[in-house]
Image (spheres, rainbow, N blue to C red):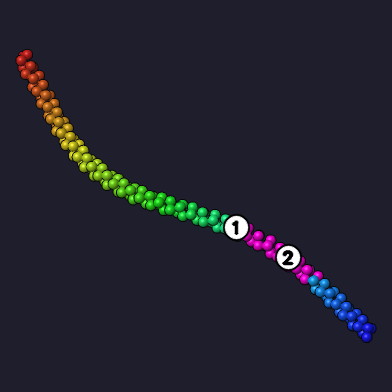
C-alpha cells in the first residue's frame, strides 16, 4: 500500500510538474504575446503621434488657406471698387467727350458763320475797290481831258 501511495504521489507529482511546466510555457507564451502587444501599442502610439502632427500641419495649412481666401476676398473687393471707379471715370470721360464734340460743333458753326461773313465783307470790299478804281479811272480821264483843254486854252491865250 505504501507503494501504491508512493506511486500515486509520484504520479500526482508528475502531473503537478507537468501542469507547472505547462503553466510556465503558457506564461512564457503570454509574456511573448504581451511583448508583441506592447510593441504594437508602441507602434500605434508612434503612428498616433505622427497622425497628430499631420493633423496639426493640416490645421495650419487650412488656417493659411483661410487667410489666403480672406486676402483674396479683400483683393476682389478692392478690384470691384477699382472697376466701379473706372466705370465712373469712363462715364465722366464719355460726358466730357460729348461736351467736347458739342463745343467742336459750335466752333465749326461759328467758323462757318465767320467765313461767310468774311467772304461777304471781302466781296463788298472788292466791289468798293472796283468802284474806287472806276472812280479813279474816271477822275484820271477827266484830269487828262481837263489838262488837254487847259493846254488848248493856254495855246489860244499865247497866240
* Percent coordinates x, y for residue 35 in the rendering: 76, 66
> Is 87 colored magenta in this rendering?
no
Q: Nearer the viewer, residue 157 or 90?
A: 90
**Which residue position holds label 1?**
56
* Percent coordinates x, y for residue 36 in the rendering: 75, 67
**Which residue position holds label 2?**
38
Helix, strand or loop for the magenta stretch, by majority = helix
**In the drawing, does residue 37 fall left or right of residue 77?**
right
Looking at the image, is 106 positioned above or below residue 34?
Answer: above
* Percent coordinates x, y for residue 61 in the rendering: 57, 56
Farthest front residue? 2
Looking at the image, is 22 positioned above or below residue 70?
Answer: below
Q: CA distance from mark 1 to mark 2?
A: 26 Å
Dot 2 lies on which element? Answer: helix
Which part of the image, by quadrant, shows the C terminus?
Answer: top left
Residue 102's disc number: none
Q: Residue at x 9, y 23 (%)?
A: 146
Residue 104: quadrant of the picture: top left
**In the drawing, does residue 51 fall left or right of residue 80?**
right
Question: Tag 2: Cα neighbours inside 10 Å, few (<14), some, or many (≥20)?
Answer: few
* Percent coordinates x, y for residue 16 in the rendering: 85, 77
Amino acid at each position: 500500500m505504501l507503494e501504491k501511495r508512493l506511486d500515486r504521489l509520484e504520479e500526482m507529482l508528475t502531473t503537478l510538474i507537468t501542469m507547472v511546466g505547462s503553466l510556465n510555457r503558457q506564461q512564457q507564451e503570454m509574456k511573448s504575446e504581451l511583448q508583441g502587444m506592447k510593441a504594437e501599442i508602441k507602434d500605434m502610439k508612434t503612428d498616433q503621434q505622427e497622425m497628430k502632427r499631420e493633423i496639426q500641419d493640416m490645421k495650419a495649412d487650412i488656417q493659411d488657406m483661410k487667410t489666403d481666401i480672406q486676402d483674396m476676398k479683400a483683393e476682389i473687393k478692392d478690384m470691384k471698387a477699382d472697376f466701379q471707379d473706372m466705370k465712373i471715370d469712363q462715364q465722366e470721360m464719355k460726358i466730357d467727350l460729348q461736351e467736347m464734340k458739342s463745343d467742336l460743333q459750335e466752333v465749326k458753326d461759328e467758323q462757318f458763320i465767320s467765313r461767310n461773313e468774311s467772304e461777304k465783307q471781302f466781296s463788298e470790299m472788292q466791289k468798293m475797290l472796283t468802284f474806287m478804281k472806276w472812280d479813279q479811272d474816271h477822275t484820271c480821264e477827266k484830269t487828262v481831258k481837263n489838262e488837254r483843254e487847259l493846254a488848248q486854252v493856254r495855246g489860244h491865250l499865247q497866240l
